[in-house]
Image: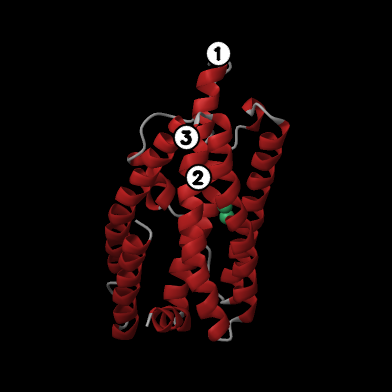
């Protein structure tokens, strides 16, 4: 059932492009903020290297989604920062990740750990969503996009793992569990808000489109809502 919905979305280039543009926005988001990959403040070389690699992976993913849009002959769209999932999660996230030189080492560690916990849940969500997408692309004979998405998933799964590991590395076990819990809850609340926003956005944008496209967009909305429950 779910695979069929994804296949239907992919069969319609406009709805497929909507989904790809949302992924693209997520990959670009770190470039829009100043507090994501602050490796200068990492207390170990290992974490600094992971953060740098992570930043470079997201650049690579940005190019892969741009290419994917070209392959389906659709434009890439610059979404406003508030339209993406990251920003919605942050509206439910207490505090800031932004580190300044005068922060004592303990504060620097906590800010880094909070960023990593935030990223962990985002990465987990995107990896899950992309795997449905990759399966549907492969099943629809959309081989180039399927390959690109599979390459992205491989990296995202690594991001899911290392972000969680370093939360435990930076904090005591108890603090790490509490921190992860704060960001798990922020992500779950954001899922519902985001789903509602996306459905509104799609409906407004495609009000004038043909009935089959509109029907597909309603179904896309229901997939987003399902995703909200699945990853909450
Ligand atoms: Fe990515
Ligand atoms: Fe990632």
* Image coords of residue 222 (percent x, y): 30, 71
| Marks 2 and 1, the one that precedes in the sequence | 1
Q: Measuring 34% from the left and 79% from the top, which residue is drawn there?
A: 216
**In the rendered view, would you say 162 is above or below 144?**
above
Is residue 36 in sight in this rendering?
no
Marks 2 and 1, how far apart at CA:
24 Å
To which residue does mark 1 refer?
102
Relative to residue 198, is residue 27 drawn left or right?
A: right
| Marks 1 and 3, the one that precedes in the sequence | 1
How crowded pointer 2 is (Cα within 10 Å; few <14, some 14-19, many 20+) is rated as some
**Helix, strand or loop at mark 1:** loop
**Helix, strand or loop at mark 2:** helix
Between label 1 and label 3, give the one nearer the viewer: 3
**Helix, strand or loop at mark 3:** helix
**Ligand 1 quadrant?**
bottom right
Q: Measuring 50% from the left and 27% from the top, which residue is drawn there?
A: 110
* Image coords of residue 189 (percent x, y): 30, 49
> In the figure, residue 203 lies in which quadrant?
bottom left
**In the rendered view, would you say 105 is above or below 15?**
above
Image disc number at residue 176: 3
Mark 2, ligand 2, within 8 Å: the answer is yes
């Amino acid at each position: 059932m779910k695979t069929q919905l994804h296949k239907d979305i992919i069969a319609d280039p406009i709805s497929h492009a909507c989904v790809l543009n949302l992924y693209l926005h997520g990959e670009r988001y770190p470039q829009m903020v100043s507090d994501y990959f602050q490796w200068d403040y990492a207390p170990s070389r290992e974490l600094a290297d992971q953060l740098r690699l992570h930043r470079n992976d997201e650049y690579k993913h940005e190019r892969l989604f741009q290419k994917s849009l070209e392959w389906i002959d659709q434009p890439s769209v610059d979404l406003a920062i508030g339209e993406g999932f990251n920003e919605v999660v942050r509206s439910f996230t207490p505090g800031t990740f932004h580190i300044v030189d005068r922060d004592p080492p303990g504060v620097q560690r906590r800010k880094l750990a909070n960023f990593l916990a935030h990223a962990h849940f985002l990465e987990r969500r995107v990896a899950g969503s992309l795997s449905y997408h990759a399966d549907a692309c492969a099943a629809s004979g959309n081989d180039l996009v399927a390959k690109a998405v599979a390459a992205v998933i491989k990296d995202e799964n690594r991001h899911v793992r290392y972000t969680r590991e370093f939360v435990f590395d930076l904090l005591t076990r108890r603090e790490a569990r509490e921190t992860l819990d704060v960001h798990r809850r922020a992500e779950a609340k954001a899922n519902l808000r985001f789903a509602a926003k996306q459905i509104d956005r799609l409906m407004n944008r495609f009000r004038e489109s043909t009935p089959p496209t509109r029907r597909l967009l309603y179904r896309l909305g229901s997939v987003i809502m399902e995703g909200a429950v699945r990853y909450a």
